[in-house]
Image (cartoon, rainbow, N blue to C red):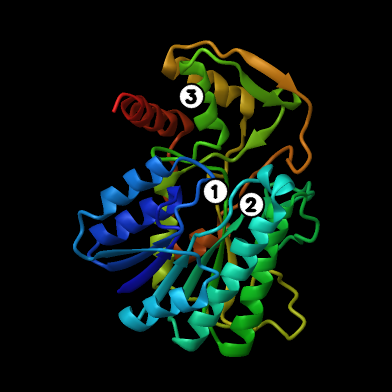
Amino acid sequence: MKILVTGVAGFIGMHTALRLLEMGHSVMGVDNLNSYYSIDLKEARLNRLRSFNSFAFYQGQIEDRSFIEQIFTQHSIEYVIHLAAQAGVRYSLQAPQAYVDSNITGFLTILEMCRDYAVQHLLFASSSSVYGANLSMPWHEGQGVDHPLSFYAATKRANEAMAHSYSHLFAIPCTGLRFFTVYGPWGRPDMAYFKFAQAMLDHQPITVFNQGQMYRDFTYIDDIVQGIVALLDRPPTPNQQDTEFALDPATSHAPWRILNIGHEEPVLLMDMITELEGLLNKKALIDWQPFQKGDVLSTYASNERLRALVGPLPKTSLHEGLLKFVTWYQAWRQR
């Protein structure tokens, strides 16, 4: 397969591209290498991919249509895994325009390319944050997601709607993937587990909101990648039971669907901190802060629909996943 992976220097992007390259596919990777977090880390991720002759990297903005179109023209792209986005819930309160540029305008560029070049399957990153104020747990794709609590979540919900319109109008097979708190080696430094490990090793306090009384469905990176790869050659088909006024908000008369990928086991934030303390042999110094706007109290995935499509996925335990992260991170600090 000839596969375009956007956000290829990112956490999920690098791991996904690496798995595809190991499987023998050709991967064209795009990333703007912005300074939202360490460019050094992004370059190190790319270096893992550059050892493959079947990998080609292009640096640029996904909202730049002429730049993206050159890649499609040159490589006859068959599949797209769109992971590029401005990430971060809290940062979206500070810099909303960055989210419009990347998450909205950039995604429109990708949709246009999929339309013009008859891509066989577009998989794109949504987020568990779209569930917002929904209090019915576990979260499943048939629930409404009309009350996002952050602008980041709103842009991801917009992506789902944009993809549906293009799927309906131009028969583009689209799968939106709602990721749940992805963690692991080579992760994002702005994520809680990464920031906590760094602070603890540096003998600095960690910032914990709402007395740590929040639950997250921590999902290990390899489990996420397994789901993405398993879905790649399983494009959605129209739901013939559906109507123009879709009763199921996650399927359609168009070749479009939404799927969760999570661990299906929420963990109290304080329990994650305790696990890190044990693995690092460090006691956390905690700076307690009130609940933050844009946050949700709990995330909890149901993968029932995903399992029905691809079968059981691996479920790496939090202890095993954090151990792998800590092992990588300690080596990364000493490089």
The answer to which image quadrant residue 163 occupies is bottom right
User: Foreground: 198 or 228?
Assistant: 198
**Which sits earlier in the primary sequence, circle 3 or circle 1?**
3
The residue indicated by pointer 2 is 128
User: Foreground: 190 or 212?
Assistant: 190
Q: Secondary structure at mark 3?
A: helix
| Amino acid type of the residue that numbered disc 1 sits on in the rendered structure | Gly
Callout 2–callout 1 Cβ contact below 8 Å: yes
Cα–Cα span, label 2 and label 1:
9 Å
| Relative height, residue 143 to residue 78 (above, below) | above
Q: Position of residue 89 (x, y in %)?
A: 67, 45
Q: Position of residue 30 (x, y in %)?
A: 41, 63
Q: Secondary structure at mark 1?
A: loop
Which disc number belongs to residue 283?
none
| Relative height, residue 118 to residue 292 (above, below) | below
The residue indicated by pointer 1 is 262
